Image (tube, coloured by chain):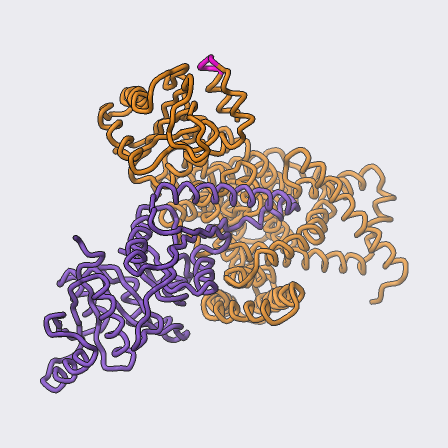
Chain colours: A orange, B purple
Amino acid sequence: MKLNAENITLLFLSLALMLFTARLFGEIFIKLKQPAVIGEIFAGIILGPTFLGMIAPGWHEIIFPPSPEIRIIQDGISILSVVLLLLVSGLEVDLSILLKQGKTASLTSIMGIIFPFIIGFSVAFLFPQLFGNNYNHPTWFFALFIGTALSISALPVIAKTLLDLKIFKSHIGSIIIAAAMFNDLIGWIIFSVLLSLIGVGVQKFSLLFTIIYLFVFIFAALILFRRIISKTVEIIQNKFSSPGAILNFILVLGFFCAALTEYIGVHAIFGAFIIGIAIGDSVHLKEKTREIIHQFVTNIFAPLFFVSIGLKVNFITNFDFVVVVVVVLLAFAGKVIGGSFGARLGGLSKKESLIVGFGMNSRGAMEIILGLLALENNLIQEVTFVALVIMALITSLSSAPIMNYLLKRKEDFNLNNLLLSKNSIISYNGNKESVINELSSIAAKSTKLSSQEIVKSVMEREEQLATGIANHLAIPHAKLKISKPFIAFCKHQSGVDFGAADGIPAQFIFLLLTPEDKNELQLNLLAEIVKKFDDLEKVKQLLPIEDKNKLVAEIKAL
Amino acid sequence: MNALFNKLALAITFSPTGKALLQETYRLKNLFNSKLLFIHVGEKDSDLENQLYKIIDDAGYLKSDYEIAWTSGDTANSIIRECEKKKVDLLISGALEKETLVKYYLGSVARKLMRKAPCSTLILKSPSLTPKKFNSFCVSTDYSIESEKAIRTAYSFALLEKAEQLNLVRDYNIPGLATAIIDSGSMDEVEKEKSVWQEEEEQKMKLYIRELNLKELKINYCILYGKEGWESNKYVRENEFDLFVISAPVKKSTFFDRLFPHEEQYSFENLPSNLLIVR
């Protein structure tokens, strides 16, 4: 079989069109503050049988001819893309983070797998007709797949959501990301075993040997050869041309392992994913290299893959409302309940646990990859696939707004939440001691401490260290036996000397009290106040304000 | 006045490193004005005892300077037991600079002491027969109560040594951050957020140093983005600090911590310099 000039022309034309449309819709969705991947899938739906094939079948056949030669090449590109996507996803899975985050992340992850798996498996096993399943496979194969499909999470969407909500660096963010990483690993292992069960792959070996080889491969990649891989990364980064040599190494090893797992009867993507984890674990792999490979895959191969989904399936004829509703409900119920329950068991508050549960709920691209592989291997039908894609989109789109809503209701210890008009005094005149006395008596009403105790601790700190910062700001503070931080605020009429380095008397005085075992919380609050007052011009605009509520609001808005 | 470490302990051996460790310990004992316990793991017999006294005498110790504990059984466990029994504050040990793959998985005495000693532990990377004072100190901090204790210990140690500088290093990492690129296709947002974090960390560190109120020594700092534990280890190695000070892990380390190293485990595994683990 050889490609003729017409085939080559049409192939490149279709690739150009796919890339262009994917980018166009990707950009539109980014502008709408939605994941680019949704735009890319949408582009496929527009170009595919759902839209273009429906309104202009002639054009559709010209651009995407049903020629077997072109189809094989397009399938090859699709496999290559998905292998690369899993390879780069693996690079970001850091298994040690689970150890660092400890019990909470482990329980969140385990419950976030077990719950959706059990719910998905049970419903699909007992009521397979709800999913439109009428294949010849035993029902429990199908039920196993639904369980797995509901238990997987999508790290990229979760990462982006955490970035958008500005909680990536927070405790909750770290728990969600650690749990999602482990979740992905387990999900892909279960799915790989499942694919082996239905006899996908070259089938050179019996099922037992395929599974043995699978676990030998995992052990070899993640434990036995991890250090050798890390050493090799170090040598390549130091001795060879950068970043070419290291990119080459990652791709060579990724493709080799993809071939290896395909050979033993497990899908190629699994080899790429696992070796991605092993390579990504290397402390020598530079952040820049990670970013380059992510850009390379994200902007070229991922769009081709996601567009190709829409080209393969008609989303209108295969849309079944009942199946979609069942899949979406099960997905939400399993993941949110499981993830939240795990986080709660791990010691988080009710609200925090719910945020974690919704944070873990995004399925995104990973679900779609999983669904497509299941579709190609006749494990599910198009109706179920369409429902899975819609579920992936709904869970991904809903995560950020729901989390945002819950975050707003969560008690968060930042200046804007802690600074209250009722704990503020304005137009005050008096020396440093009297300011501290006044603010301490306000604090005593809200904490279980006496005013004298507070004054004593604050004055001890004052004797050790001047708490005047600069730009009219002073933050007298102390660590005390309290469970929550507290802020009382004084706007001084004429200014009082708190020993600031710039010599300017303090007119904005914040009394900051924090629990004695929370070093970093004190630092965070100090840093937040200092940052708000780092622009002298803006601070000067606050000086004439004599209305307490207005001043507090202006400070919060700084 | 309370000494920084009231009681030091050294597991004594007859190797050349053992002799160098005797010299190093002698210097530190005088510096801290501490009591000293020698621990020897092995059956006691008169020949051995004589040999032991000889190398101790050769190192310049007086009989009144020390006591000796004879113990037997697993080397690391025996040392740990003696340290607990005799209420040792600082255990001094030598270490192989880098362990081989086999040793790593089997475990070694020094690493076991680093992880399990009940007291602070000083691991000397290349003990010398002619010990030198520590001039440059670096402490890893994550702003926790434990790391504050490590900083204050290092500060007092540095003052005794009349050291030139005390450096604080903070490394932080956001695993999975690069995957956000897959979702948006944009590196700008990730880079922007990273620079905000870096600014926040710088501000926090400046305030932290202020809060620590350590006035008698110049305090420098460095904020690094990357794998926690590894980045600070690399920083110490590259800057050739004489002593790297860390706080002991809060959680008991397990086999999995060694299998998937993180944070201080990098320094246990691959010493960047002399290492003081503060407990």
User: Is residue A506 positioned above or below A167 on the image?
Assistant: above
Instruction: Identify the residue at horizontal 67%, vertical 33% (top origin).
Output: A32
> Is residue A126 in view?
no
User: Is residue A331 positioned above or below A439 on the image?
Assistant: below
Decide which of A200, B98 is in the foreground and name it.
B98
> Is residue A70 in view?
yes
Give percent across and percent down for residue A372.
Answer: 64, 50
B18 left or right of A342? left
Report the residue that reaches farthest toward the bottom: B47
Decide which of A37, B223 is in the foreground and name it.
B223
Q: Main secondary structure of the magenta part?
A: helix
Report the residue that reaches farthest toward the right: A5
Instruction: Identify the residue at horizontal 62%, vertical 33% (top origin).
Output: A321
| Quarter placement of the N terminus of chain A | bottom right
**Magenta part of the chain:** A546-550
Give percent across and percent down for residue A48.
Answer: 76, 44
A363 left or right of A52? left
Give percent across and percent down for residue A136.
Answer: 59, 52
User: Is residue A544 positioned above or below A109 on the image?
Assistant: above
B241 left or right of A285? left
**How many marks can you see?**
0
Decide which of A14, A95 is in the foreground and name it.
A95
- The image quarter containing residue A490 is top left
Report the residue that reaches farthest toward the front: A503
Give percent across and percent down for residue A56.
Answer: 85, 39
Q: Is residue A548 magenta?
A: yes
Q: Is residue A514 magenta?
A: no
